[in-house]
Image (tube, helix red, strand yellow):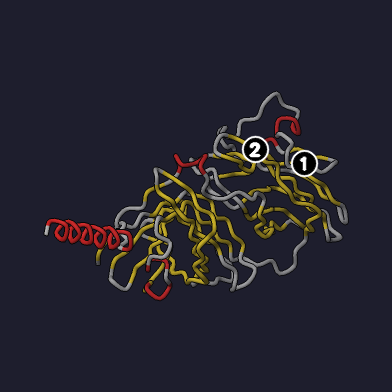
Amino acid sequence: MKGKVLGGIILILIIIVTLLLFIQEERPLQMMSRKQVISMYETNSYETFRISVLTNDPNSFHFDEDYISRIALVNGDEKTRVEIDKIMIDKQQLLHQDTVFTVVHFDLRPLIHLDDGQLIYDDASLEITYRNDTTYYIPVGEVNYVFTHDAEPSLSLGGLSATIDTYDKGSRVSGLYIELGNLTYHNILIKDIDIMSVSVKANTRQLKEVYTPVEYTDCPSDILGLASYDLFQTYVPTELRIQLLSQTSKAFYVPLVYNASIEYIERFTVKVTYEIDGTEKTQYIDDFPFIRQPLFHMDNTDDWIEIDDPISD
């Protein structure tokens, strides 16, 4: 009799253990973001930009487009609707505080298309509302989107590259090499070279004309002939007076200045302001990926932002 009771207890324990192995404990959803600078130049209405998050549950309905009812970029009281091109689960996974996080990308495009205009959000969030009437706000950082198109460009681009600074959180762009040519039969006065960003600026006060291309490993101080160069010095707007004669070209190195806490900028639009025949004009150079580095990696966990619980409508 005792043997039968003992056998029954063992069988019950085996069933319980088996069920525990197959019943997955429901985990609360965790999401994290990292602020970045998104600087884009729209060349066509199909162009997209990417916002990425870390999550402990990439298979959650939160990353299924069918469950999303509205999505927009918000900046204070301003809001711009966007549409989803695709949501993609990345192969990149990171172990953080004993939890495996996966990178998920939202590829988006704005639902506004202007003939001449610019969208500047200095502290944007991605607002995602789901069909259950809950809304998440994902911190994004700066979004700078240019819609202006040049009818007849006067300047050609002979070269464009960047120098890269390596630091404790990875790598960042430290300066810009750019070669500009005058396509016209008139002289051009270059008055400014800048990148389309509020957080990161081109330091034209220390711009230098160069005669050979720079390497991405070159240091700004070596190129500029300085003992050192401070990427976080106070930005001082400086008007240029560079003459570019008809059908000639010149190359320049422009170091950058980071004047905010956001240090991740992978690609950006370059803006050149010039004067020709007494008329001031602006030419934009399409955003280009100057650096290839994941937004999230284990050296920048201090920059990761835990996304708050959703707000119910």
Relative horizontal placement of residue 242, taking residue 17 as reference (left or right) = right
Crowd rating for badge 2 (residues with CA inside 10 Å; few <14, some 14–19, many 20+): some
Q: Is residue 16 above or below residue 85?
A: above
Residue at position x 83%, y 61% in the image: 184
Residue at position x 70%, y 34% in the image: 220
- Mark 1 lies on a secondary structure that is loop
Q: Name the residue nearer the viewer: 17 or 277.
A: 17
- Mark 2 lies on a secondary structure that is strand
Q: Quadrant of residue 167?
A: top right
Relative horizontal placement of residue 71, taking residue 262 as reference (left or right) = left
Q: Is residue 270 above or below residue 258?
A: below
Residue 116 placement (x, y as % from top left): 58, 67
Residue sitting farthest toward the top: 227
Residue at which label 1 appears = 215
Residue at position x 30%, y 63% in the image: 23
Q: Distance from label 2 to label 1 (Cα)?
A: 12 Å
Tell me if label 2 and label 1 are in contact, CB under 8 Å.
Answer: no
Residue at which label 2 appears = 165
Residue 244 placement (x, y as % from top left): 82, 50
Relative horizontal placement of residue 213, taking residue 149 as reference (left or right) = right
Could you tell which of marks 2 and 1 lies nearer the N-terminus?
A: 2
The disc labelled 1 sits on which kind of residue?
Glu
Q: Name the residue nearer the viewer: 15 or 302.
A: 15
Residue 268 placement (x, y as % from top left): 62, 53
The quadrant of the rendering that contains the N terminus is bottom left
Circle on res. 237: none
Relative horizontal placement of residue 60, taking residue 92 as reference (left or right) = left
Crowd rating for badge 1 (residues with CA inside 10 Å; few <14, some 14–19, many 20+): few
